[in-house]
């Protein structure tokens, strides 16, 4: 019989995404297991969840007296995959390597029940490819949480042509119960919805810098102080309708031909990678991170997101 509801969740991976996913599950009342390979990884995962909760409490998104209860719902394990045995839903948040994910799903499938949903939070790989080696690809689905998962509502639900309808229904209901906004991807496409949009924007931003139209700093400032600022309350198609589709068509008639259409990485990006300038991890990318604080940038991002979340909570609360 197909699973009808989720009660126990196992999250694999305690890097960027796993702790936040486990946290949202536990906050919503679900019994949760966070699984990683090392004790140090678990310690970092636990510390990240505690830091998230402390920050959220300052915006009244969670109460300090709830911390112990939320953490008490999470079991932290580093003993292989044994922790998935009783899960109704397994969310894989491992590194973005297809062979690794494929083998991981085969290993998980050998342990869990036949009605357990197997989800990957991959940011771009297809569900069909991830579940290609499983015996039951009908229960494999992508649930792409956005980073940081405890603050951003979107989760893209991207099934393959094999995914059973009940899997989509059950995981969508689960995501809504954790405060997320599931968006169904109707076609199993690389990058789903939002990453296709994001990388199209990145491609043009790189072209603007490469062609000398503007500097990285000016591009970022232009984005943050124009349509980026209104995007939270004005969608792309809403905006097109508001300005008029005839005007959009007119602009497209002369602008689109001038936009970048490179089928691969931009030389501006490749040159930096070749030099070893990879961004924050090496101290230099498009910015010199020895003079720019990554911690400050992330803190400003999270504070803005928490302010928005607090406003959403206030609007939805009964008066």
Image: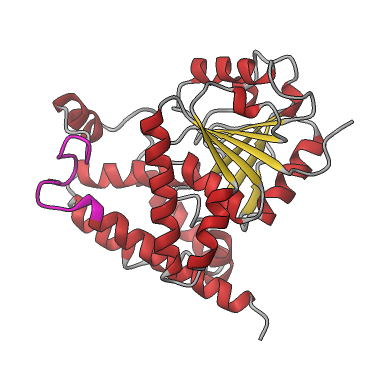
Q: Residue furthest left?
A: 291
Q: Quadrant of the N terminus?
A: top right
- State the scheme by which the image is colored: secondary structure
Looking at the picture, tell me which residue is in the foreground, 68 or 180: 68
Q: Can residue 227 be seen at all in this image of the molecule?
A: no
Residue shown at 39% from the left, 33% from the top: 41
Residue shown at 44% from the left, 66% from the top: 306
Q: Position of residue 260 (x, y in %)?
A: 35, 40
Q: Position of residue 106 (x, y in %)?
A: 63, 15
Residue shown at 36% from the left, 32% from the top: 40
Q: Residue furthest right?
A: 1
Looking at the picture, tell me which residue is in the foreground, 300 or 39: 39
Q: Quadrant of residue 187?
A: top right
Q: Quadrant of the C terminus?
A: bottom right
Q: Position of residue 261 (x, y in %)?
A: 38, 36
> How many numbered marks does the figure carry?
0
> In this rendering, would 286 be left or right of 246?
left
- In the rendered image, residue 175 lying in the magenta stretch gets the answer no
**For residue 164, above or below residue 66:** above
**For residue 234, above or below residue 196:** below
Q: Position of residue 139 (x, y in %)?
A: 74, 28
Q: Over which residues does the magenta segment extend?
A: 279-295
Q: Quadrant of residue 70?
A: bottom right
Q: Main secondary structure of the magenta part?
A: loop
Q: Residue furthest bottom?
A: 319
**For residue 79, above or below residue 30:** above
> In this rendering, would 105 be left or right of 264?
right
Q: Can residue 250 be seen at all in this image of the molecule?
A: yes
């Amino acid at each position: 019989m197909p699973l009808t509801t989720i009660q126990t969740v196992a999250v694999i991976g305690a890097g960027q995404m796993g702790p936040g996913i486990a946290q949202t599950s536990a906050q919503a009342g679900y019994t949760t297991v966070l699984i990683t390979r090392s004790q140090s990884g678990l310690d970092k995962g636990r510390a990240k969840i505690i830091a998230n909760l402390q920050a959220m409490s300052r915006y009244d998104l969670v109460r300090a007296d709830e911390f112990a209860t939320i953490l008490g719902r999470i079991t932290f394990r580093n003993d292989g995959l044994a922790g998935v045995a009783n899960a109704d839903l397994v969310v894989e948040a491992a590194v973005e390597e297809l062979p690794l994910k494929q083998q991981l799903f085969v290993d998980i499938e050998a342990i869990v029940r036949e009605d357990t949903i197997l989800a990957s939070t991959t940011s771009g790989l297809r569900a069909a490819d991830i579940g290609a080696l499983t015996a039951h690809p009908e229960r494999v689905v992508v649930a792409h949480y956005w980073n940081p998962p405890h603050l951003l509502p979107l989760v893209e639900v991207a099934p393959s042509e094999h995914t059973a309808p009940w899997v989509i229904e059950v995981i969508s209901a689960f995501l809504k119960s954790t405060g997320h906004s599931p968006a169904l991807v109707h076609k199993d496409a690389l990058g789903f919805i939002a990453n296709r949009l994001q990388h199209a924007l990145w491609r043009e931003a790189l072209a603007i810098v490469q062609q000398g139209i503007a500097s990285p700093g000016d591009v970022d400032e232009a984005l943050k102080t124009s349509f980026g600022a209104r995007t939270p309350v004005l969608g792309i198609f809403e905006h097109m309708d508001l300005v008029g589709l005839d005007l959009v068509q007119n602009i497209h008639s002369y602008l689109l031909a001038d936009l970048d259409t490179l089928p691969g990485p931009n030389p501006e990006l490749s040159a930096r990678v070749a030099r070893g300038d990879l961004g924050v991890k090496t101290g230099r990318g498009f910015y010199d991170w020895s003079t720019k604080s990554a911690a400050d940038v992330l803190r400003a991002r999270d504070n803005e997101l928490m302010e928005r979340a607090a406003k959403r909570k206030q609007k939805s609360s009964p008066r």
